[in-house]
Amino acid sequence: MQNTTSRLIKVIDHTRQIRIYLADSRAVVQEAATRHGCSATAAAALGRTLTAACMMGAELKAADDLVTIRIRGNGPGGEIVVTATAQGTVRGYILNPEADLPSLRPGKLAVGGLVGHEGTLEVIRDMGLEQPFIGRVELVSGEIAEDIAQYFYQSEQVPSLVSLGVLVNPDLSINSAGGLFVQALPDADDALLQQIEEQVQAMGPISSWPRKYGTLEEQLARMMGNIPYDTIGEVPLAFRCNCSRERLGNILAGLDPKEIQALAEEGRDIEVVCHFCGEKYHFSPEEIV
Ligand code: ZN
């Protein structure tokens, strides 16, 4: 059975040493993959990034704070850009959504190859201050989870276990998508983090968890075993873009008047496509002049 709504839960262990974010992002990834016409591998690459951004968004404090993940790898998929809010809305794109590579083995999409093994991952936190906070790391593998873990460790000095998974059906529908951050808070006992890590490893790939273990709450109970914890938040997740006709029309206002004149003479409409969500807007030349 597939969940039609995406959500994440935040928990903390009773000793306040470990914070955990666990997300079911299937519906969000499905919408992104459909909107952009993603290949299986591109859906997995974009879906993993969207899922990570949702969980990073959940760390933001104020309602209009934004987090952006920008991955620039040397693979055929091209740049991935994803933006999320504290309310659980997320949007994003992969530059070449049709790009694809043969799977490494059945069920193992070549995400690292599509993204590229070399390049950078940037996280931009815009918290309404004069300058956004920008952290940048070199890609570890392009598999995204490892790259995000590296970012947390290097840029924020937070040892983290990061797991991201998207399972794509042969008809390109999204079977499951999920993500997990396990983060050690300051002065956390390494042994506790290690215990959780071992339990996570034993559960297999995260994309198999909904089928094997059920709801997020059931997955978490399995993962934590005998470690007591409290749920400290729940956020519904949705793919949502803030583009509008007006906003994209403003971009056109910056076009060369001669170009607009030429289009007007040909009597042609101008189509503008929002990168983030694939929405198409049509403008007649008269509307722009
Ligand atoms: Zn849009």
Image: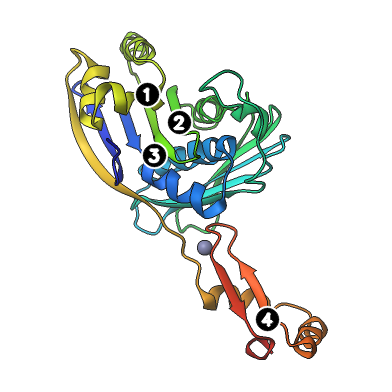
Q: CA distance from mark 3 to mark 1?
A: 19 Å
Binning the other alpha carbons within 10 Å of mark 1 as few (below 14), some (14 to 19) or many (20 upward) gives: some
Q: CA distance from mark 3 to mark 4?
A: 40 Å
**Residue 265 in view of the camera:** yes
Q: Amino acid at mark 3?
A: Met
Binning the other alpha carbons within 10 Å of mark 4 as few (below 14), some (14 to 19) or many (20 upward) gives: some
The residue sitting at the front extreme is 171
| 75 w.r.t. 199: above or below | below
Q: Nearer the viewer, residue 158 or 45?
A: 45
Q: CA distance from mark 3 to mark 2?
A: 19 Å
Q: Residue 245, position in %: x, y?
A: 53, 76
At 72% from the left and 38% from the top, the residue drawn is 76
Q: Residue 170, position in %: x, y?
A: 50, 33
Binning the other alpha carbons within 10 Å of mark 2 as few (below 14), some (14 to 19) or many (20 upward) gives: many
Q: Residue 231, position in %: x, y?
A: 19, 33
Identify the disc placed on residue 39: none
Tell whether 79 sits left or right of 169.
Answer: right
Q: Quadrant of residue 154?
A: top right
Residue marked by disc 2: 167
Label 1 or label 2, whichever comes before in sequence order: 2
Residue marked by disc 3: 55
Tell whether 163 sits left or right of 36.
Answer: left
Confirm or reject: label 4 Cβ below 8 Å from ligand 1.
no
In what element is the residue under mark 4? loop
Label 4 or label 2, whichever comes before in sequence order: 2
Label 3 or label 2, whichever comes before in sequence order: 3
Q: CA distance from mark 1 to mark 2?
A: 8 Å
Q: Quadrant of residue 164?
A: top left
